[in-house]
Image (cartoon, rainbow, N blue to C red):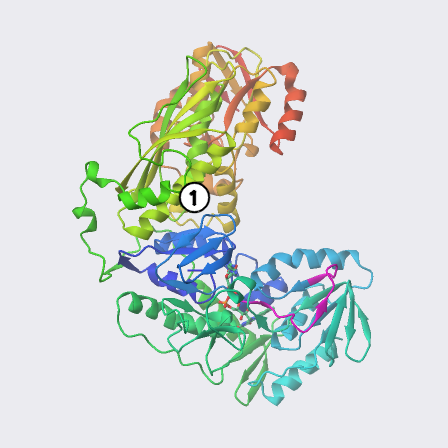
Amino acid sequence: MIGGGHANVQVLRKLCMNEYRGLNVILISEGYEAIYSGMTPGYIKKFYSLEDISIDLQRLCFNAGATFIKDKVIKLDSKNQIIYLNDNPSISYNVLSINSGSISNNQTISIDEESNIISAKPISSFVSKLKEIDDLIKKSSKKKISIIGGGVAAFELSFALYRRYDENISIDIISDQILAEKNLNISTIKRLKKIAKNLGINLISNQVITINKSEIALDNDDKIQSDCVLLSTGASLPDWLEKSDLEKTENFIAINHQLQSLNHKNIFVTGDAATIKNYIKPKSGVMAVRQGEVLKKNLFLFLLKNPLKKFKPQNNWLYLIGTHKNSAVLNYFNFSFSGNWCWQLKKIIDLNFMRKFSFSEQNDMNKKIYNLNNFKDDTPKMYCQGCGSKVSKNTLINFLSNQNNNKELSDSTEIKFEQSTVLQTIDHIKLFKSINPYDFGIISYLHSQNDILSAGGSVHSLSVSIGVPFSENLVESFYLEYFMRGIQIEASKDDAYLAAGHSYQTEEPAVTITMNGSIKQKSKKYSANEGNLIYLSKPLGTGYLLAAYFQNSQLLSISDFEKLIRYLKTSNDSAAKSGFSHGSQLMTDVSGFGLASHLGDICQSSNLSAQINLKNEILINNKLEILKNYKSSGYKNNHLSSFDTVEIKENHPLIKIIFDPQTNGPLLMAIDKEKKNEFEKEFIKNCHTQPILIGEFIKQKEKLIYFE
Ligand SMILES: Cc1cc2nc3c(=O)[nH]c(=O)nc-3n(C[C@H](O)[C@H](O)[C@H](O)COP(=O)(O)OP(=O)(O)OC[C@H]3O[C@@H](n4cnc5c(N)ncnc54)[C@H](O)[C@@H]3O)c2cc1C
């Protein structure tokens, strides 16, 4: 699925209640959130928050049993059925559902590169650029915005912006076609124009010819100055779809009433990007939502080889256009009303739609199970669980044919070490449900790399074992390729050699990495000295935050999750270099056993204790409610094994973090007090963030660690 648009999200919603065995669903969308267009003007007015108008695509995929890949599609090769992405490896598909919206149409206007232009479409990018408009308006003395385009969206946008800037702004709406939508009745047009007039919004009925910096030239030679120009001109296709070989009609992807591309029946296209041949309708979020209701049936009917349903676009539909603070205009056939009740109706409709995408805190969705014809229910049982559980030879050969080493599938590989002693470590982590396996490859590499870094080494070579889900062909290749590419991208940064690999099919996809390291620095657990400062290279919290995610916690927002993934993908390599170059002889990584255990081990080996000052900065996420309410499955054992070795007040608000298991957690470094300033300076230079000073080693006392 490409794009978390209004139709695709409904397909995913269906998958939250129905499971199609044998089907592997991937959603690729540019952001973690899908913006609901109907509530966007309310967001601009500051009536709704960003969370209110956003669908959390990662969470939706998690509940739908789909994989979410946050990336931008840059090319579609529909002949070979391959999607090319900006940051991730390409993906092959059997069936595709495109619902990626549109961009603002600027084909008739000549636009200077330096112009301050912001497009209203795609709506997600407009929302992310609102801050830019805020800054422009704040700085300016004129406080003027020009909106190019004269449709309902331009009017609604102008009313919303007028509210946003507390009526302290002047707005032009410029178009040679003001409120020309076919379904708007005369009364509605009059009402909207009157509201605009009362608010002092200028309606300029001219065509825009050029935009130069902040000057707009019109077809009557008039020039208009503005701080910011917004393009709210109709929709057009983004470049990658324009260049695809999908048949077009009226400059959009031509589809039939079953929502399929006319020349590729395995490609469904909905929303702004699609036009039903000989059936042109205005593009709107409402239309995309309606198409979603048919798409969510047709995709599965197609997979089950059953006849498809027909989408019948309405000739007329309800418009609810937000105007004043708590008011809207309703337009339906020849009816036109305005007032608070219209706004209340709009609110009810919008909130009802969004409610479908909020999940209560539950894991088991009790899904109805279906089997796709060409896949058999007993797939896992058919597979040999011994050596025969490997991925197929073809998949392996295909993957290896693009690699430089071990093309011939040799039995084992020679590794040359300069030193007679090497570091070696092994780690195994299970794929987090719905997470991009490429990201997971990166995370699993970094998780293993920590063991080598903390022992004073650098990664020399590695062997991997990849567990892909029970699957065939494309799915098997997707997981193998994505896991491996993630691992390889990090290995290449270390100049590390991938020596050997193994693959297998499993119900619990996972990555196991054995890493060899060359020793570069001395780092021993017994080398802490009294008075040494204790630093963490990054904050803690991956264990309970992932637990909150797996339990659909409403406390974990989209941006919280994004931040968590960013930390999970942050390497400790530069942190280790900063520590060692300032004489640190002791590092360890905080991983599965948690801070109390890993620090406790060091205290024990060095015959010291540690005095730690726990502050909120030790947390990836400073919402204490999440820490209070969630814990990872490893927490209990960590607590049991370390609790007696530490002193901490039972009601300490951060008590749980010291037992929280970490995936690719921070390095814990001991630094000489005299090197404090130099170390911190270099750390900030190398890592672009402050190291976290948590305390110091003290003379040995009864307990290993004293937490304040
Ligand atoms: C200011 C404004 C207000 C509007 N108000 C309303 C309204 O009240 N009611 C209404 O019905 N319509 C409204 N519209 C129109 C509406 O925004 C669009 O018609 C609607 O969003 C189109 O929906 P869609 O499902 O096709 O795609 P979108 O909602 O645009 O979703 C597309 C998704 O695909 C993702 N995506 C895009 N390109 C790529 C790529 N290359 N790779 C990966 N992912 C990609 C995007 O990030 C996005 O998540 C408004 C438009 C504007 C500009």
In the image, 470 versus 473, the foreground residue is 473
Q: Height in image: 280 above or below 362?
A: below
- In the picture, which quadrant includes the N terminus? bottom left
Q: Is residue 83 left or right of residue 198?
A: left
Residue 530 in the image, given as x and y percentages of width and height: 55, 10
Q: Main secondary structure of the magenta part?
A: loop
Q: Is residue 189 magenta?
A: no
Q: Height in image: 442 above or below 292?
A: above
Residue 574 in the image, given as x and y percentages of width and height: 57, 28
Q: Residues within 10 Å of mark 1 (few under 14, many from 20)?
A: many
Disc 1 target residue = 438
Q: Height in image: 73 above or below 479?
A: below
Q: Can I make out residue 174 in this image?
A: yes
Q: Can I make out residue 348 in this image?
A: no
**Is label 1's Cβ within 8 Å of ligand 1?**
no
Q: Is residue 177 left or right of residue 432?
A: right
The residue under the point 42% across, 73% down is 291
> Over which residues does the magenta segment extend?
101-117
Q: Is residue 674 left or right of residue 645?
A: right
Q: Height in image: 219 above or below 110?
A: below
Residue 452 in the image, given as x and y percentages of width and height: 45, 23
